[in-house]
C-alpha cells in the first residue's frame, strides 16, 4: 500500500514589479519574467563600509538598480519581476517554494516568452529537477541562474553575465535564437538541462556541469543553441502543472560495512517513509549479503526504492545481466543515468500526484521511464501471463502466448535492447553436473517446426546447472527487432535440452524494452 502524500504549504507572499516600457515596444513584445528568490547573486554587505561584514540578500529594487545592464535590455523588451517578499538563501529552499514558483509560471505562462529564476547555487539543481517534473508539457524556456560572487559591489562577479545571458536565452525570439522548451541551468558559458546538472565546484565560476548529457548550448562571442539536443515541443498536449509533492523521501548511500549495521533497517522502517533513493556502487552493484538484501526487499514491498549510481558519470545497469539481479528480484527499480538529486525530486513529484495514487504500479513504471529528459534510457516491462511454466526432457517444448508489446508504441529505431526475463526460476537436476540448453523462438505457431536456422530462432542458450539464478535473462534484440511490429503480439516458444531428471520451472515471463530518444507523455 502506497503512503498518501503530504502537501507542503508555506505562507509565501510575492510581489509583481513591472519594468519600464521598452522603446519602440510592439503589441506582441512579450519579454521575460524574472522570478527573484534570492541567493548569492543578490547578496550585499550588511555594512558597505566594511568589506568583511556579513552578507544579506538584497531586495529586488536595490538589486535591479545595481545591475545597470538590465536597463539596457529593458530598453529593448519587457523585463518584469515577481519577487519573494523575503528573499532567501538557497540553503533554506523547500518544496513549498517550488510549488510557489510553479504557480507563478502557471499564472504568467501566456504573458511571456520565457522565465528566468534567480537562485542560490547550493540547491539550484534540486529546484531545476523538481520544476522539470512539475511543469508538464513545457514549451517555453525556464532558466535558473545565480553566481558564485554577488553582483552588488563586486566588480569581478560572474553574476552579471549569467543573468544577462539567461534573459537573452529566455527571450529567444527577440534574438532569433531557437526556443529552448526546457527547465535549464545557465552558468558561466554553458546551458545545461536542469535535471541533468550537478554542482561540481563550491567556488569555481564553472560551478555546474552535466556529465551524462552534453550542454544544450554555449555562450561565448555568440550564443549557440544545439537544437538537436533539445526536447521536442511540437504537438505537445496543453501545458499543465503538478503542484503537490510528497517530501517523505530519503537518499541513502551504501558503503562498506552497511551490511553489518542497523542503520538502513532503521531508515526503511520510518513510519511515513514513501520513497528511498539507494545510491549503489558502479553500475548499480550492492552487497550480496542476505540480511542486507532482505532489508531492501522488505522496503520495496512497501515503498518505492530506486537504484542510482554513486558515480558522477555512467548508468545503473540493473537486470541487464544475470549477475546483477539481486536488487531486481527484490523489487528495486532502476532509472539508468538519472542523478541522485533528480531521482529525489522525481519521487517527490510522482508520489505526490493524486491521480497516480489510484494506480500505485504506475508510479513504478514512470520511475523507470524518461519523463522530462532526465535519463537516457527508458525501461518498459511487458509481463506475460504469470503462471508456472515447466520444461524437462519429456515436456521439452512450451509456447507462451503473446500479447501486444509496448502499448505506447515506440518506433523500432528507438529500441536499443530487448531482453527476455524468466522470473522465479528453479532447476531440479540429475546427477550429471553439466549444462542445460534453453532454445528461444519468436512468433512460432504451435505446429511450426523448430529449425535453428530459421530467422525466428533467437539462439540456444547454455547454462551451467549449478549456476542457475532465480532470474534468467536472454538478449533477444536482433531477432525481436526483425519480427516485432509496434502493437503486434509476440508469442515465445521455449525448448529444453537436458538429461533425464533435469527439470526447469519458472513463475513469470517478461519482455523488457530499453528505449533511447523516447519520452513518455503523462
Image (tube, rainbow, N blue to C red):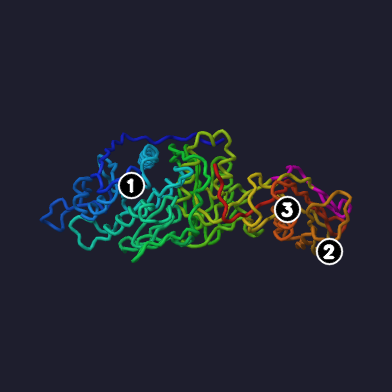
Give the mark nearer the N terminus: 3 vs 1: 1
Is 387 included in the stretch rendered in magenta?
Answer: yes
Note whether 204 is above or below 470 in the view shown: below
Q: Position of residue 468 (x, y in %)?
A: 73, 58
Residue 388 lies, in percent from the top left, at 77, 44
- Numbered mark located on residue 484 in the image: 3
Q: Tell me the quarter of the image containing the C terminus.
A: top right
Question: 309 or 296, which is in the foreground?
Answer: 309
Q: Nearer the viewer, mark 3 or mark 1?
A: 1
Residue appearing at x 33%, y 46% in the figure: 29
Please tell me which residue is depicted at 78% across the width and 51% down the height of the picture: 492
Q: Which residue position holds label 2?
A: 453
Whole-angstrom CA distance, mark 3 to mark 1, is 48 Å
- Disc 3/disc 2 C-alpha distance (Å): 18 Å
Say which residue appears at 45% left-offset and 52% top-offset.
195
**Magenta stretch?**
383-399
Quadrant of the image for the N terminus?
A: top right
Residue beneath disc 1: 31
Amino acid at each position: 500500500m502506497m503512503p498518501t502524500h503530504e502537501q507542503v504549504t508555506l505562507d509565501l507572499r510575492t510581489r509583481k514589479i513591472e519594468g519600464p516600457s521598452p522603446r519602440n515596444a510592439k503589441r506582441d513584445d512579450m519579454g521575460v519574467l524574472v522570478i527573484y528568490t534570492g541567493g548569492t547573486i543578490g547578496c550585499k554587505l550588511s555594512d558597505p563600509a566594511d568589506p568583511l561584514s556579513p552578507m544579506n540578500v538584497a531586495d529586488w529594487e536595490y538589486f535591479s538598480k545595481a545591475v545597470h545592464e538590465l536597463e539596457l535590455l529593458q530598453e529593448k523588451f519587457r523585463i518584469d519581476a515577481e519577487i519573494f517578499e523575503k528573499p532567501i538563501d538557497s540553503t533554506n529552499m523547500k518544496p513549498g517554494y517550488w510549488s510557489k514558483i510553479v504557480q507563478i509560471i502557471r499564472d504568467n505562462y501566456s504573458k511571456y516568452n520565457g522565465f528566468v529564476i534567480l537562485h542560490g547555487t547550493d540547491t539550484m539543481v534540486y529546484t531545476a529537477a523538481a520544476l522539470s517534473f512539475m511543469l508538464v508539457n513545457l514549451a517555453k524556456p525556464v532558466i535558473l541562474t545565480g553566481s558564485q560572487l554577488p553582483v552588488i559591489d563586486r566588480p569581478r562577479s560572474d553574476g552579471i553575465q549569467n543573468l544577462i545571458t539567461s534573459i537573452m536565452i529566455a527571450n529567444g525570439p527577440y534574438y532569433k535564437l531557437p526556443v529552448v522548451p526546457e527547465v535549464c541551468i545557465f552558468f558561466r558559458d554553458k546551458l545545461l538541462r536542469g535535471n541533468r546538472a550537478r554542482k561540481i565546484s563550491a567556488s569555481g565560476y564553472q560551478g555546474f556541469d552535466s556529465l551524462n548529457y552534453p550542454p544544450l548550448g554555449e555562450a561565448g562571442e555568440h550564443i549557440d543553441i544545439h537544437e538537436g539536443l533539445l526536447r521536442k515541443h511540437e504537438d505537445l498536449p496543453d501545458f499543465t502543472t503538478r503542484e503537490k509533492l510528497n517530501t517523505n523521501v530519503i537518499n541513502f548511500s551504501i558503503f562498506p560495512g552497511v551490511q553489518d549495521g542497523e542503520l538502513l533497517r532503521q531508515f526503511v522502517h520510518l513510519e511515513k517513509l514513501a520513497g528511498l533513493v539507494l545510491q549503489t556502487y558502479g553500475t548499480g552493484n550492492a552487497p550480496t549479503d542476505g540480511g542486507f538484501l532482505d532489508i531492501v526487499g522488505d522496503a520495496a514491498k512497501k515503498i518505492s526504492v530506486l537504484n542510482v549510481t554513486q558515480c558522477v558519470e555512467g548508468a545503473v545497469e540493473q537486470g541487464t545481466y544475470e549477475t546483477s539481479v539481486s536488487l531486481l528480484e527484490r523489487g528495486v527499480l532502476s532509472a539508468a543515468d538519472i542523478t541522485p538529486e533528480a531521482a529525489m525530486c522525481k519521487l517527490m513529484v510522482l508520489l505526490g500526484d493524486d491521480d497516480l495514487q489510484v494506480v500505485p504500479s504506475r508510479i513504478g513504471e514512470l520511475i523507470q521511464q524518461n519523463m522530462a529528459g532526465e535519463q537516457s534510457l527508458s525501461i518498459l516491462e511487458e509481463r506475460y501471463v504469470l503462471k508456472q511454466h515447466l520444461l524437462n526432457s519429456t515436456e521439452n517444448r512450451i509456447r507462451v502466448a503473446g500479447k501486444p508489446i509496448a502499448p505506447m508504441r515506440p518506433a523500432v529505431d528507438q529500441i536499443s535492447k530487448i531482453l527476455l526475463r524468466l522470473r522465479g526460476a528453479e532447476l531440479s537436476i540429475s546427477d550429471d553436473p553439466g549444462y542445460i540448453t534453453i532454445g528461444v523462438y519468436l512468433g512460432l505457431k504451435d505446429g511450426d517446426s523448430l529449425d535453428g536456422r530459421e530467422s525466428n530462432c533467437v539462439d540456444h542458450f547454455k547454462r551451467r546447472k549449478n549456476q542457475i539464478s532465480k532470474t534468467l535473462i536472454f538478449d533477444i534484440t536482433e531477432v525481436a527487432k526483425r519480427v516485432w511490429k509496434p502493437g503486434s503480439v509476440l508469442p515465445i516458444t521455449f525448448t529444453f535440452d537436458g538429461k533425464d531428471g533435469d527439470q526447469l520451472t519458472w513463475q513469470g515471463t517478461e519482455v523488457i524494452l530499453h528505449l533511447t530518444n523516447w519520452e513518455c507523455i503523462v
